[in-house]
Amino acid sequence: MNNASSALKVAAGIFLTIALITIVVVLFVSAQEATKTAQNNFSDIQTELSQASFTVYDDTTVSGSQVTNALRKFKDRDQFGIQVITGKNHQGEWYGSILNISGNSDDFGSVINRSLADISSSWNESLNEYVNPSGKFKARVIKDNSNVVRGLIFTQTAVNS
């Protein structure tokens, strides 16, 4: 009888150990799935926040002072360019990086080269690159094929008198 009792205690201990291990594995797997979901949600939120600073420029009309503010704000951003097309400079001037904006090619929005233009030329009234603070500019956001914002284009439409 003593051997049977000991055998039952050992069997119960083994059963409880297996049950405990199973519960731990199930909890670990479900925690791992929850962690993956949380990471994906965090990544989505991070992407939305990084894109949010550009929504003000997405097919809107902005003033010249907003254009110069954007030049200052994004001047040191890596792999990013801003083109400003004024009434006197119809080809436009790139600041930061020069982007590929021609056609619908696979490298649309990609960086072609670094621009040597100085944003201070946008404040000098004697230059064609001058951005009139009261001017109106149509803003456009440039995204590459990975849907990453690579630049902005501001095209002057009218000047307030």
Image: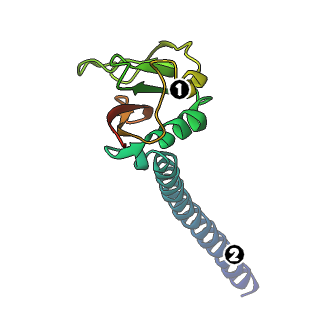
Is 38 rendered above or below residue 124?
Answer: below
Q: Earlier in the sequence, mark 2 or mark 1?
A: 2
Res 144 label: none
Report the Cα–Cα distance between label 2 and label 1.
Answer: 80 Å
* Viewer-nearest residue: 131 or 42: 131
How many neighbours does mark 2 have within 10 angstroms: few (below 14), some (14-19), or many (20 or more)? few
Q: For this rendering, which residue is in front, 131 or 25?
A: 131
* Residue appearing at x 56%, y 58% in the figure: 35
Q: Indicate the position of residue 141 as horizontal and vertical percent values.
A: 37, 37
34 versus 5 height, above or below: above
- Label 2 sits on what residue type? Gly
> How many badges with numbers are in the image?
2
Nearer to the camera, 143 or 130: 130
Please give the label number shown on residue 122.
1
Callout 2: SS: helix
Dot 2 corresponds to which residue? 13
- What residue do we see at 50% from left, 48% from top? 53
Disc 1 element: helix
Please give left or right for residue 70 compared with residue 21 in the image: left
For the C terminus, the image quarter is top left
The part of the image, by quadrant, that contains residue 151 is top left
